[in-house]
Image (cartoon, grey):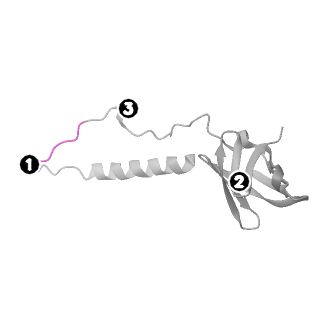
Amino acid sequence: MHRRVTLATAIGGAILTVLAGCGSDGSAGESTPAPTTPSETASATPSVDPSSPDATTLSGDWQIPAEDYVLHLADDGTFVEDFQGVVDFRTGKYQVDGDTISLVGDDGNTDKGTIEGETLKFTLGTATRVE
């Protein structure tokens, strides 16, 4: 997500630079834009909410006992699901974007969930961290 924001900021800045280069041809009635201070310009580095979840803070084991489901999230962004007694039922990579977690399986399917406090809410149910 941060790369997308940085790229979007860079592209926006480049467009503004090109438009600014189009400048005035000296025609009457045109105004010169007021100079900007550094605080008025867009920052190339987006602010990061240190409390927002990422692969490191979500790593560990999560379970939905009623479904006999355990989700193992690794620091490297990979996951393994155990489901109804089948160990390594599904594997893949996971991505965190704000309060959304996407499980992109090696099987081609993607499951999305919502990160809500200390829970992960999926269609299957609400997963809690295994202690």
Q: Which residue is mark 3?
A: 39
Give the side of residue 31 with respect to residue 36, left or right.
Answer: left
For the record, the magenta segment spans 27-34
Q: Main secondary structure of the magenta part?
A: loop
Q: Quadrant of the C terminus?
A: top right
- The residue depicted at 22 percent of the width and 50 percent of the height is 23
Seen from the viewer's position, the closer of residues 121 and 38 is 121
Give how far across and how far down residue 34 sits, in percent. Answer: 23, 37
Foreground label between 2 and 3: 2
- Residue 12 sits inside the magenta stretch: no
* SS for callout 2: strand
Give how far across and how far down residue 127 sits, in percent. Answer: 75, 48
* SS for callout 1: loop
- Residue 33 sits inside the magenta stretch: yes
Asked if marks 2 and 1 touch (Cβ < 8 Å), the reply is: no
Q: Amino acid at mark 3?
A: Ser
Q: Is residue 77 visible?
A: no
Q: Mark 2 or mark 1: name the one nearer the start of the chain.
A: 1
Q: Which residue is mark 1?
A: 28
Q: Amino acid at mark 1?
A: Ala
Q: Mark 3 or mark 1: name the one nearer the start of the chain.
A: 1
Q: Mark 2 or mark 3: name the one nearer the start of the chain.
A: 3
Q: Which residue is mark 2?
A: 94
* SS for callout 3: helix
